[in-house]
Image: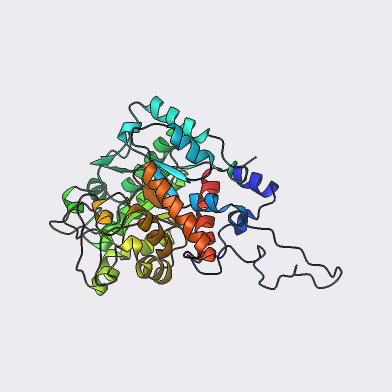
Amino acid sequence: MTVLAGLAAAGFAVGAVVGSGSGGSGAGGTGSSNGSGSGGDGSTGGSSTTEEPQPTLAETLRPGELAGERIVVSIDGTGLTPELHEAIAKGKVAGVVLFEADFPTRAAGRALIDEVQAVPRPRRLAHLPLLVMTDQEGGEVKRVDGPPEASAAAMSREGSAYSREQGRLTAANLKSLGVSVDLAPVLDVGRPGGVIADTDRAFGGTATAVTKTAVPFAAGLQAEGVAATAKHFPGLGSATENTDFEAQSLTLSRAELRSVDMSPYRAYIAAGGRLVMLATAIYPALSPRPAAFSHKIVTGELRGRLGFRGVTITDSLGSTAVAEFAGQREAAVDGAAAGDDLLLFDDLPSALAGHEALVAQLHKGGLKRAPFLAAAGRVLRLRAELGR
């Protein structure tokens, strides 16, 4: 039985898990699963009764489980600790991120992933595998041996067919280890002197060049069953330092951000890209807040103007860029309010603090339930589809 079939058999409206897919509107996750809006069964005669709409899976979760669908935590060499085991068992995390330290050998990495997936989860979530993520860009950013055999810059020089094949080979490699989400490709449009271009992480120095080869890489990943993650929206191509280690305020105009930096995302979205990662840099032309904490950027630009309906995820909330703006509890609440579906924490204590803050705000009404359900629904749907 597939994951989706198992959920359907358990009485959940799996097809309606994401509601309208509106990216945080009040329509997500609260209405009828039949999409009619009338509450009727669509019949023209006969029975005078109507069928009660099935609840979405998100609507059946307890507050702690619902908040857990927004949490992703890095393991980074610590293994499956008793504390992480407990968090997974209580439904407090939706996924994990792995690094080089988690893959001392392929066998060890696969064993860790199998161990994590084997942790019993709450009954409502028992059918759903955790999201298992890693950064496998190629070049300098590569967490496990194997494809891609070239950096983004080198793939771009070889062309779109080569890039797509590298995406396909990368997915096959990751899937063999149990990794379901690649935190790649980088869609940043490189600028001279920018850290992304200087480290060969950019697919090009123009929107056209990036689109031509980064989007095929994503398509190759997804053709083999691994979800792609375009990053770092709205674009870090002009950043001179890595936001993991230094806060950045990028003074590009709104017109340039939209016509250049955001441009590759149109093709990525049209091609069915599954996830988008939000940068933690500040873009004064768009918002005074870091992108990941800006409703104007996440919900207004990405979901509203560009029409993205997939899963959004923050860049690391343990970065210097975030630390200068907010603590981990505040970052969790601000990210969720902005429209980030997944909040990426560097360690479990931070993740649990963020989880606690989300639950508290759900109880207080500081975070609106309808968009929260919609966001959790998108994550649940992704988990179900990647578990097929």
Q: Position of residue 150 (x, y in %)?
A: 26, 41
Q: Which residues are magenta?
A: 237-252
User: Toward which corner of the image does residue 271 lie, by quadrant?
Assistant: bottom left
Is residue 145 visible from the viewing direction of this image?
no
Residue 385 is inside the magenta segment? no
Residue 232, compared with residue 46, is above or below; it is: above
Q: Nearer the viewer, residue 308 or 49?
A: 49
Q: Position of residue 328 (x, y in %)?
A: 35, 52
State the scheme by which the image is colored: rainbow
Q: Which residue of the protein is positioned furthest toward the right in this rendering?
A: 46
For the point 54% across and 69% down, the residue is: 26
Q: Which residue of the protein is positioned furthest toward the left in this rendering?
A: 193
Residue 251 is inside the magenta segment? yes
Q: Nearer the viewer, residue 290 or 213?
A: 290
Residue 133, compared with residue 112, is above or below; it is: below
134 relative to 40 in the view: left or right: left
For the point 39% across and 56% down, the residue is: 332
Q: Position of residue 113 (x, y in %)?
A: 45, 33
Q: Position of residue 289 (x, y in %)?
A: 29, 66
Residue 317, compared with residue 50, is above or below; it is: above
Is residue 266 visible from the viewing direction of this image?
yes
Q: Nearer the viewer, residue 68 or 230?
A: 68
For the point 39% across and 26% down, the residue is: 108
- Quadrant for the N terminus in the image: top right
